[in-house]
Image (spheres, helix red, strand yellow):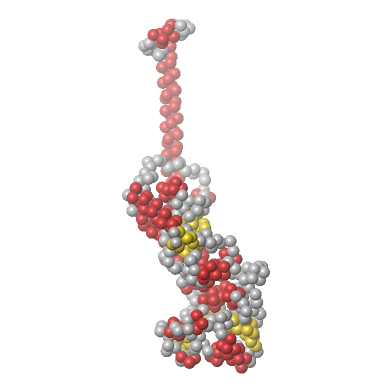
Amino acid sequence: AVCNPNTKSERMVLDTTSALGRRPRKLCLFVSLVVVALSATNCLLMVRQFSANSLEGEVGRWIEGLAYPPPSDAVPEEIMNRTHAVNTNTTASPTPRNINTTASTTQPSTLQGTIVIQLMGELGNHLNSFSFYFAVRTIASTEFNLNLTLHVRKQNQLKATTAAQNVQCLKSFWNLDFDECDWLQDNGRKGELCKNKISIQSGALFGLMKSSNNHTITKLAQSLQMSSTTSDGIRSFLRDYVAILKDESILELYRRRGVGWTIDEPYPFLYNTERIGAPDSLINEFYSRGLQEYLAFDSDTKISSGCCSMLPEKDEQVFHYRSFVVDLPRRHLSWGGAELTPEKSATLLSASLSPGTKIALVSGRSTQHRVTAYKNAFSNRSFVVREIAGQSAIQDFCFLAHAQAGLWGTVQSTYVGWASLISKELQNATIYGVNYPARDVNITSRVPTNGDLARIVHYPVFDLLDEDVW
């Protein structure tokens, strides 16, 4: 305005200024020189700053590449590098790295996730499902820096309610809400409240896939439904799950639509709809990694809570007669539920136990005449027999799970099988199998692959006649 007074008001201002105003050409020259000087200085500073930032960023990335080689089980490149249509900003420059900070001192924050286990069957099946969860939780925590919050769904059956009550006797499940997904009555039709959450999650992810035209989301969404029960399979779906939890477009969708399992967990969740559990291979792998403690009774409250009543003595051998004939009177033989007769059981015990050994007989729902037959057969071999009767199912299981000197029973009994894994002081467990002509499918012996477990638990198999079992 000073150099080119184009308007009347500007000329008036110029005319009313001081001596400088009365000499506009000199003022113009002075202002121009100042502007040029300031511009040159600012430009030089910007060039220096740009060069420093660029060099620092390149060096930082180079150092980061040396310090963090990609792990062998890293998330596949095609997943890590994908870009959704919802989040297409790929032009932003990375924040310059501070090369004065050592890369190894940066600790990534722990990811938060949710896992929902569908429970089926009775106590043994529940423990099998929770053992699977323990393996998933352990791998997630130690290998993926992922903390999982557990929720459960139970069947709409009386046995499911009883199983849930029994499982809560184990200290790891005291505070677990088994009734969170209780069943509701809707227009005369039974339906589970939580079932809608799974369909809502699937629908939301399908909608995002359609809007972004990115079918990678479909693959990742499928991995949310757990199916594999091997450690490698668990790692596979956890990799995909971690990729989902790091995808801002998916997390924003969950926050915006409230799709998560709970308000406090607004992110995708893992789940199963079919029966799922831990096979022998998984149990062997995680037995020495805390599984035994995870499934243990609490030593301080097991009696006061009513979960346990009587307990075996330290030098007492515990023999369990499951009596499948009570539950399956017509097919227990063909199915494989037949057990050693009293005389054959006494012969088995005598092969390794000396006369005078204490025997605690746990017979559950067996008829009294069969219990008496076992007591007589054991007494005839000079064993000191104590009958454990009048307890609830969970109290019988607690008794088995506290055996110390020895535990005996059929391999078909989940109570004996899980008790052999839980008992902390157990010295020996003989869990036998029997093949006989009336059995449809024979079994074979096995040896645990876990060294600690193999020293304690043994699985002999006997080939016998039909009259040797009942």
For residue 90, side relative to residue 460 (left or right): left
Name the residue rendered at 41%, 83% in the picture: 441
Image-quadrant location for residue 276: bottom left
Residue 399 image offset from top left, x and y in percent: 61, 76
Is residue 343 visible to the viewer in this orientation of the structure? yes
Is 47 positioned to the left or the right of 302 in the image?
left
User: Residue 24 versus residue 109: which sits nearer the camera?
Assistant: 109
Q: Is residue 136 above or below residue 398?
A: above
Q: Residue at x 49, y 76 (%)?
A: 448
Judge by depth and name the residue closer to the eye, 253 or 26: 253
Q: Residue at x 46, y 48 (%)?
A: 255
Taking 451 as reference, is 34 above or below it? above
Q: Residue at x 40, y 14 (%)?
A: 1
Q: Residue furthest left?
A: 213
Q: How many marks?
A: 0
Task: Look at the picture and state if 19 lies above or below 72.
Answer: above
User: In the rendered image, is residue 132 in sight?
Assistant: no
Q: Which residue of the protein is positioned furthest toward the bottom in this rendering?
A: 380
User: Residue 86 appears at what percent x and percent y?
Assistant: 37, 45
Across and down, in percent, residue 424 comes to 60, 73
Q: Which residue is nearer to you in this view: 183 or 58?
A: 183
The x, y position of residue 110, in whole percent, is 51, 53
